[in-house]
Image: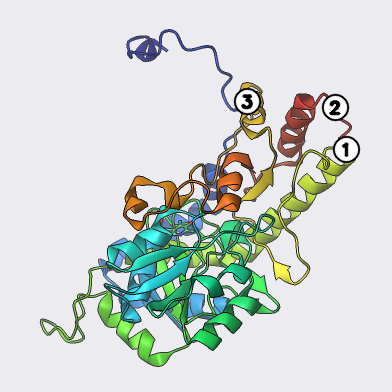
Amino acid sequence: MSTHAQMPGMENRPEQRHAAFPFLDLKAQFASIRGEIQAAVNKVLESQNFILGPEVRDFETEVARFVGSEFAIGCASGSDALLLALMSLGIGPGDEVITTPFTFGATAGSIARLQAKPVFVDIDPSSYNIAPGLIPAAITAKTRAIMPVHLFGLMADMDAIVKTAEAAHLAIVEDAAQAIGAGWNGHAAGTLGAVGCFSFFPSKNLGGAGDGGIVTTNDAALADHLRTLRVHGSRNKYSYESVGMNSRLDALQAAILRVKLRYLPAWTAARQRNANRYRAMFIENGLETYIQFPADNVHQNHVYNQFVIRLPERDAVRRHLQQAGIPTEIYYPFPLHLETAFAHLGYSKGDFPQAEAACREVLALPIFAELTEDQQASVVAAIADFYGHKITC
Ligand SMILES: *Cc1c(COP(=O)(O)O)cnc(C)c1O
């Protein structure tokens, strides 16, 4: 392209094949529901009712019903959901919150933003979630809460975490940003802690047309507090009972998300079908000896926000796939305890060996609902090619 020729640094790049399909095809999803989305957006535009109002209220009711919680309170993002959850529990300076270093930055960021201290605990190497057996040793007199993350759509070991939290009188704040609809022994993500936090960032299983989030709770007093915290700590106009934020879910987002929520069960089933298909294809081609599959427990309902495989040759495999036009991502390349933002916590390399190893070895493959069998076969074929296997699928 002529514009590229003028961009500095582009001239000597080696030829790279364009991805044959995207890592996440949001355009395919939009094409399947275009008319309904446009009608929902138009309805809000005609009403000119943009702040809270009926769309947000109805969406909150529908999410509460979907998740199985008593209350749901919309807010501006998943990050704000975490922040509001901690604020509603009164967590602040000097308090400690136990969480995982193998997650998106907002998890520990929400704790640090309130001048509380994130206390990291290493992960389980097969689920990538916080290792519950290591939590008790991290509890101190200052610990107020545990913030497990249901990473990639697989719930953390909530039996053990709930038991530990109850014994030590700690609140649980679930970071369920990647796990809407996920289950654990018949319980849904966002119903087992004091507060559950969800994100509607476009790449989540239920993604909006921009940022959005929601908090769920079964506690009426917490729900009431959360509803005031998201509007400046105000219950009645220009009267403030606490220092809150401006963090509302836009009516436009709520209207779009209400349409998409109706499709979520079908989209989740498609992600699970794709996950099973990957497993079958890898096994058919004798690749299961090279690759660690995502944990798959019969007691869990994994909703596969990501399909993450683990392999020691991760970086070489990723380069090989890139050259074959296969898109992949790395969630996450760096553990939070070694990031500059959390340097003040005083952790060093080697403190959480499982999280550090996962950062070197995980690779996310495309798993979106509209992914075709042919596209999956091309992913598996490119990995088989790396290992010198002949492909049979
Ligand atoms: C996406 C995500 C968040 C933050 O959600 P935003 O809506 O992007 O602010 C928090 N935690 C985890 C684990 C996430 O994946």
Picture residue at 58% right of the left edge, 50% below the top: 353
Disc 1 residue crowd, few under 14, some 14–19, many 20+, Cα 10 Å: some
Expressed as whole percent of the image width and height from the top left, the position of residue 129 reads 60, 61
- Asked if 26 appears above or below 77 in the picture, the reply is above
- Asked if 117 appears above or below 142 in the picture, the reply is above
Q: Which residue is mark 2?
A: 389
Mark 3 residue type: Gly
Mark 2 residue type: His
Point out the frontmost of discs 3 and 1.
Answer: 1
Disc 3 residue crowd, few under 14, some 14–19, many 20+, Cα 10 Å: some
Would residue 301 be seen by someone viewing this image from the given angle? yes
How far apart in space, not on screen, are marks 3 and 2 (Cα)?
19 Å
Q: Which residue is mark 3?
A: 325
Task: Using the rendered view, name the quadrant where residue 188 is placed.
Answer: bottom right
Mark 1 residue type: Gly
Expressed as whole percent of the image width and height from the top left, the position of residue 9 reads 37, 13
The reply to whether dot 3 and dot 1 touch (C-beta < 8 Å) is no
